[in-house]
Image: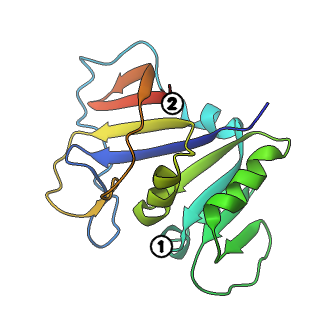
């Protein structure tokens, strides 16, 4: 069975994945649990189901790869950087590289971010699942998840959870 490419990230209510400076300290709930659902999104369980993480150079520069030392991490970059440890630096077509990875045996692939990287996968229409946590914050400006000129992609809501004001939606392609 082909491994899934799963986008999993948080956005502000107005569609930003980071503040203008790349900050993400605003990614918290509102503390109100009155609307919490019984089912919760278990991020640790999600991580158990993946063995490859894909991120852009800004995420790498913020040392986010350190959270995935036991996974194979692909970093999309325009620079020529030597692979080391569990890190593979890709300056070519990252979508083609990950599609080849998809054909290998293993667990699913976590498309981590940021927006420029994710945009390539959306335009190629190769994301199998979208797990989006909507944070109860309007940032007003920042780094957008969805850039312009994307194809129409029809999705099916498979699961949802609410936890402290954060709504987590899990969609699959139809």
Asked if residue 112 can be seen in this view, the reply is yes
Is residue 67 among the parts visible in the rendering?
Answer: no
Q: Secondary structure at mark 1?
A: helix
Of residues 77 and 42, the one drawn nearer to the viewer in this rendering = 77
Question: Residue at left 69%, top 74%?
Answer: 89
Q: Quadrant of residue 71?
A: bottom right
* Residue corresponding to mark 2: 173
Quick check: 61 left or right of 66?
left
Q: Is residue 111 above or below residue 155?
A: below
Residue 132: image x %, image y %? 40, 38
Q: Residue at x 19, y 48 (%)?
A: 14
Secondary structure at badge 2 equals: strand
Asked if the residue under mark 2 is in contact with the one under mark 1, i.e. CB atoms within 8 Å, the reply is no
Residue at 80% in and 45% down:
103
Q: Position of residue 114 (x, y in %)?
A: 45, 61
Number of numbered markers:
2
* Above/below status of 57 relative to 74: below
Q: Residues within 10 Å of mark 2 (few under 14, many from 20)?
A: some
Q: Earlier in the sequence, mark 1 or mark 2?
A: 1
What residue is drawn where x is 44% and y is 23%?
156
**Residue 32 % position (x, y):** 23, 27
* 70 displayed left or right of 79: right
**Mark seen at residue 58:** 1
Left/right placement of residue 10 relative to residue 74 reads: left
Q: Position of residue 130 (x, y in %)?
A: 47, 37
Label placed on residue 98: none
Q: Nearer the viewer, mark 1 or mark 2?
A: 2
């Amino acid at each position: 069975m082909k491994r899934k490419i799963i986008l999993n990230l948080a956005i502000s209510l107005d569609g930003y994945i980071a503040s203008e400076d790349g900050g993400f300290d605003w990614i918290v709930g509102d503390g109100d649990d009155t609307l919490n659902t019984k089912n919760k999104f278990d991020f640790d369980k999600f991580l158990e189901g993946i063995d490859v993480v894909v991120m852009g150079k800004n995420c790498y520069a913020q040392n986010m790869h350190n959270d995935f030392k036991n996974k194979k991490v692909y970093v999309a970059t325009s620079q020529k950087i030597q692979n080391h440890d569990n890190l593979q630096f890709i300056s070519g077509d990252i979508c083609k590289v990950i599609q080849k990875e998809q054909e290998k045996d293993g667990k699913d692939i976590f498309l981590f971010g940021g927006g420029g990287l994710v945009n390539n996968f959306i335009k190629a229409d190769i994301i199998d699942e979208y797990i989006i946590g909507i944070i109860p914050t309007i940032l007003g400006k920042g780094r957008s998840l969805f850039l312009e000129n994307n194809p129409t992609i029809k999705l099916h809501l498979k699961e949802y959870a609410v936890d402290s004001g954060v709504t987590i939606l899990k969609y699959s392609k139809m």
